[in-house]
Image (tube, coloured by chain):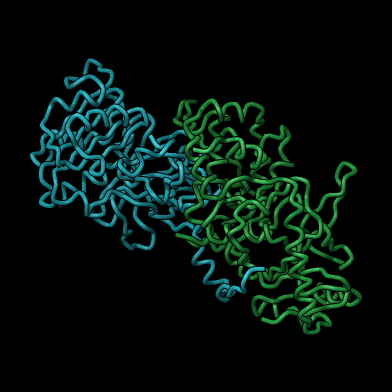
Amino acid sequence: MPAPTPCRCATPSPDQDQKENIFLPREANIIRVEKTTEMERILTLRLADGSQMKFEPGQILEVGLMGYGEIPIGLASSPTRTNTFDIVVRSVGRVSQAINTLGKGDTLLIRGPWGHGFPLENLRGHDLLIIAGGIGLCPTRSLIQYALDRRQEFKRFSLFYGARDPQQQLFTADLADWRKSKDVDYHETVDKSDPTWKGNVGVITTLFSKTKIDPGTRVVICGPPIMFKFVIREIDKLGIPHQNVFVDLERRMKCGVGKCGHCQMNDKYVCTDGPVFAFSEIERLEEAI
Amino acid sequence: MSSHFIKESDFAAFLAGLIKEKKVVGPVAKTSRQQEKFVFAQLERGEDLRLDYDVTILPPKKEFFPTQQDLVRFDGPRREGCVTPEEKVLFGVHFYDVKALDMTDLLFQERNDDRNYTARREAATVVISNIQKVSPRAFWSSIGAEIQPQGHDAWLSRIAGGYVLEPRTPKGAALLRFGKFATATPAQIAAARQANDAVAAQCPERLQGTSESNARKVRAAFGQEELWTKLAEDCFSCGSCNTVCPTCYCFDVQDWWNVDQKSGARTRYWDSCLTEDFAKISLGAGATENFRESRGERFRHRFMRKAAYLNEKLGGPACVGCGRCSAACTADIADPTAVINNIPEA
């Protein structure tokens, strides 16, 4: 028979328990709304209690409304900006459609920030290349803004952005700035052109021929699952070691706190162990890429 | 802590006293399709307690992680959390189910402490009882045998003429005042040990190999698509294996409204990784992406979870050998011994 074991600590008071309830959301007010495509809106939020939310670029929030539910969304702005933060909501399901009926002055409920964002310590002092495909621009925008705000912390900063077609481009005002900016070596492409488009046409890997990337560069990738495989091939051609490549993954996340099991990928929980992983950490994990 | 003996003739009064003062949950009989089955339920009368049960339909985790549990209730703009610790005595749990509780205790507590589970858990007193009858699909003697059950407050063993109660914690010792207990003699303590040890040889099924060798070979078999497709050929994706599992803890969260269309709740429900939409997301305009689309992938995921993925965290497999999944599976393809024993060594 087993040896005796000590019992757990005494039960905290119910009040303390309610405060510690990891499922209890807090309020954030919508202070700005911008429709960016037919399906997506950028919401700028501020915590209702006026405090500044502490977060790292690349972390996620659970965003929702009581009676509808919650959805996981990557923070789309940098903590170096004011006391507001941005999220992009694509209308695809019950919760996102409900959120996209709200306007300026309305209140959303959030939990988080959760998870591990981009490893700033590892990125600082090096060349930085960010590769964003489609809606992958939203979470990476938190790092793009960070790198632009703290430009001196990074050496050469390159950014590749690919969208399905010109109408699907997100953050068009930012894109216009980045095209002109001397702080970022910006390249963009669309899979399918239209008569208004004067830029590059082709998949995102066609952008690698447009600029010079040093093998010591730190690379951040976020996009649809199919994109990773092709981008990694190009990274390998450049001789960039996989521990210097960071991928921001998506899965079906439900609780955001590493419990519910939905986002499990091999032995990792994407919501808490990620969503950002060093590629070297996951490349041999089945089900990852 | 010392061991105590209560005579068979005094046991009913002990239970009656306990039930009078505390909420007591224990194994009781339930007839289903002319078969006697067992469930954990609140005891209204001591006579209902069936310590001679083999295995319960659902594991006792439901006492701390209910099949549906409100997390946040709302009424207009008002919201409140629903952490509701309730004192209760969970009486007559088999040791393998306590090993499973040890796992869910750790998993709900680690990183982000989920008070919706842990507060309930801390408010409970758990009493193990020795296994008097072995269920037909049990294999608990051959899986994770190196791991001992931790999270219990007392251990009750039936011996000739009565029961030996060994308190493990002050909460367990607090039960002594409800009955006429005497200090157990060395012979009674030895008899209690014998009652627990003897039953281990009676497990009808056996998992071969060690926790490490099984983790290694199950993991190594990940890429054998044909193997998993074949194993899952008859799977109905019903999730019964998950539902009855004492170590499964996945859940879905859904919001709902009361008829007043003003109030409602955010509630979690047990979920199953074998069901088709468990890892499925919407991409909009009717398009979806499913990160584990085939039955083979989902079946494999369950075995990876049970035999390999969590081993480092838990110190052994996330399976305690209760055999509930083997019995619950309509197609009888979920039996961990049948699946793992037939995977060749890596």
In the orientation shown, which residue stands out farthest toward the top? A195
Chain coloured cyan in the rendered structure: A
Q: Position of residue A189 (x, y in %)?
A: 22, 25
Compared to residue A148, the image places residue A166 above or below, namely: above
**Is residue B281 something one can see in this rendering?**
no
B251 or A28, nearer to the observer: B251
Q: Is residue B332 left or right of residue B267?
A: right
B315 or A242, nearer to the observer: B315
Q: Residue at x 76, y 61 (%)?
A: B198
Compared to residue B194, the image places residue A174 above or below, namely: above
Q: Is residue B24 left or right of residue B239?
A: right
Q: Position of residue B98 (x, y in %)?
A: 65, 61
Q: Is residue B92 left or right of residue B272?
A: right
Q: Residue at x 91, y 75 (%)?
A: B9
Can you say which quadrant of the picture contains the C terminus of chain A? top left
Chain coloured green in the rendered structure: B
